[in-house]
Image (cartoon, rainbow, N blue to C red):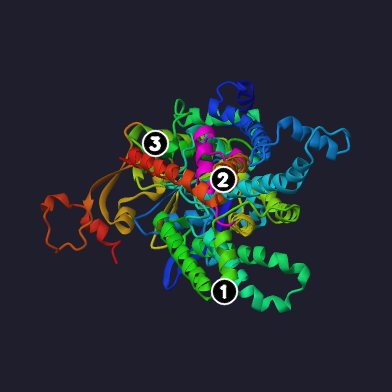
Amino acid sequence: MPATAEAAAMGQRGIPPRVARRAWTVPALSAVLLVAVVTSSSVGSVPISLAEIGALLLQRLGLATASAAVDTHAEILFAIRLPRVMLGVLVGAGLGLSGASMQGIFRNPLVDPGLLGISTGAALGAVASIVLGGKLAHGIPPALAPYVLPAAAFAGALVAMMAVERIARVGGRMVVATLLLAGIAVNALASALTGLLIYVSNDAQLRTITFWSLGSLGGATSRTVVATAVFLGIPLLLLVRYGGALNALLLGEAEAGHLGVDVERTKRTMIVLVALIVGAAVAVSGVLGFVGLVVPHLLRLAVGPDHRQLLAGSALLGASLLLGADAVARTLVSPAELPLGIVTAALGTPFFLALLLRERRRLA
Amino acid sequence: MIEALSISHRIGSATLLEDVSLAVSSGEVLVLVGPNGAGKSTLLRILAGEIAPTAGTVTLAGRPSSEWSARKRAELRAVLPQQSELSFPFSCYEVVLLGRTPHTLGHESQKDHAITRLAMAVTDTRGYEERAYPTLSGGERQRVHAGRVLAQIWEGPSFRALLLDEPTASLDLAHQHAMLRLARRMADDQCAVVCVLHDLNLAAQYATTLAVMHRGRLHAVGRPARVLSPRLLADVFEVDALVVPHPELSCPMVVTRGPLERKADSPSLSSPASTPSNESLQGGLP
């Protein structure tokens, strides 16, 4: 039907509002993230005013010499708070994006790295490196030692994700019940093995594991930020570009193939990227539940399921929400702080239950 | 031209297709018919590239389809499946727009939006633009996917193939005819259309070529009026039927009496008067 001249003449008229509105997703959420970054740099057990942050930044960049700021504030801002905020941005973006990607790959809006055992797999890898690392450390050059835990977390995430994908795919289709059961099984196995490792660990290892597994951004230094930027940030930037392919994949694997998507290669690449991101996030901040589930859901309610906006949007919103949760964790019982994993789970669980109830009403 | 060259397909010891060759050119609507398990859908899925046959090749526009890039293949060939598993709350407009995926590099142009609207118009889905796909009925979903598939090959290279797997399965009578009329219009616009159907009368009315499959083989290929005969209906479909000219259109019509009585002496519920043509049919039975 070569009605293209007619088609072109019809022009912009009648593009549905939601489709037209999508273009605003990324700019709007970037603005939200900017506000979140500035706010969470300012709040904490030692509040630093926005004017002061501005002055200190200008001073650091050599654009201003006179300083109205308190000396210790410069130290707190640059050595503690900014690394923490940047780590929060990276981890939050990673969790939001990996949640959105997994919901697309598995064609199910109710999955996230935690539910399917990917985070638990990463945690198993990390715990294994803490407990067994000492025995293996002789063979590893000291320069590579800091990367043993992230690498082990990545390997754990990858194995878990591949196992779940393989089990749940039956003849090119994802069977939801099998998917969730596979997630439960992987979760259970990884938890059991983690428990076994904890059982054989010594007191020092046990303290490390316990503190780490509650989830926190507290360990942020400029070095962890740089390492995370490499191992989480690069896969993040690569993964964001798969939105169009994911949209097609949601129709089913055969249909995506008919639409010109190389399904096997796309899926394989995305699984490795998600595993890298989840592995890196778990390695630096422990298991932070529900961010990956809640963020894409919130966004889908606002802008619909088009993954070209959803992926970038989930990264931006995930970063903003995690910064918010971390600000709560730092200030609620100040000067002490709550483990971040407790805050995200406490905020995320009611949301997840509300989602389930809504789904149930819809199906009733 | 989309062409199947000596296609055979086996799963374990079961032979689903045995040395099937056929070619469909631009302007042609080839309708695949056959009883359950004859291999129609398997052949269509092989033509669609969903499964690789154990022997033989599929060519698209003269080249083996594996030699085209995935994106180029998608510009040349669109496939409407029997059903899709989309469970995300895309609006119908967004689903149809997905058909433009092979043509867009990240962002749709005005032309993509315009084609989407036209594809929705011809599939009678205008007014569904903002409805969430998961809330549609089976027939409505089928029409939205038809719109998506048409948007995919709305225009493009001189050769395009459209493969339809039982496109009328969940549609009401009016939409069944509308769907097949659309297939004919796509053929008039230089598409090669391959369509699996169960309803022989729809097939006879809209096919330019009828391909009858039986036990994994091509039993007969040709114009519907030449292919359809009481003998073939008895041999392949095991029905006792008449083939009469349509009272007004220039196509044959199949009028069934009932399932074929396998043996003349088998206990029969029907009166002897209702099986007058049995003797002419017996020749075709094994």
User: How many C-alpha atoms fall within 10 Å of the one at disc 1: few (<14), some, or many (≥20)?
Assistant: few
Residue extent of the magenta highlight: A286-311
Q: Quadrant of residue A266?
A: bottom right
Which numbered tag is attached to residue A202? 1
Magenta-colored segment: predominant secondary structure: helix
- Which chain's residue wears label 3? B
Q: Which residue in the structure is indicated by mark 2?
A: A329
Q: Which mark is residue B135?
A: 3
Classify B240 as above or below A201.
Answer: above
Q: Amino acid at mark 2?
A: Ala
The chain identifier of the residue carrying mark 1 reads A
Tell whether label 3 touches label 1 (CB within 8 Å): no
Please name the residue shown 75% across and 41% down the image.
A73
Residue, x 73% and y 56% (percent of image)?
A227
**CA separation, marks 1 and 3?**
56 Å
Disc 3, SS: helix
- Relative depth, front residue between A168 and B127: A168
- Taking the spot 55% from the left edge, 73% from the top edge, the residue there is A201
**Spatial CA span between label 2 and label 1:** 29 Å
Q: Residues within 10 Å of mark 2 (few under 14, many from 20)?
A: many
Quadrant in the picture for residue B181: top left
Q: Amino acid at mark 1?
A: Asn
Question: How far, Cα to Cα, is label 3 from label 2?
Answer: 41 Å
Apparent side of residue A74 relative to residue A201 in the rendered image (left or right): right
Q: Position of residue A96 (x, y in %)?
A: 58, 46
The quadrant of the rendering that contains the N terminus of chain A is top right
Residue A332, quarter of picture: top right
In the rendered image, residue B223, in percent from the top left (x then y), is placed at 44, 46
Which chain does the residue under circle 2 lie in?
Answer: A
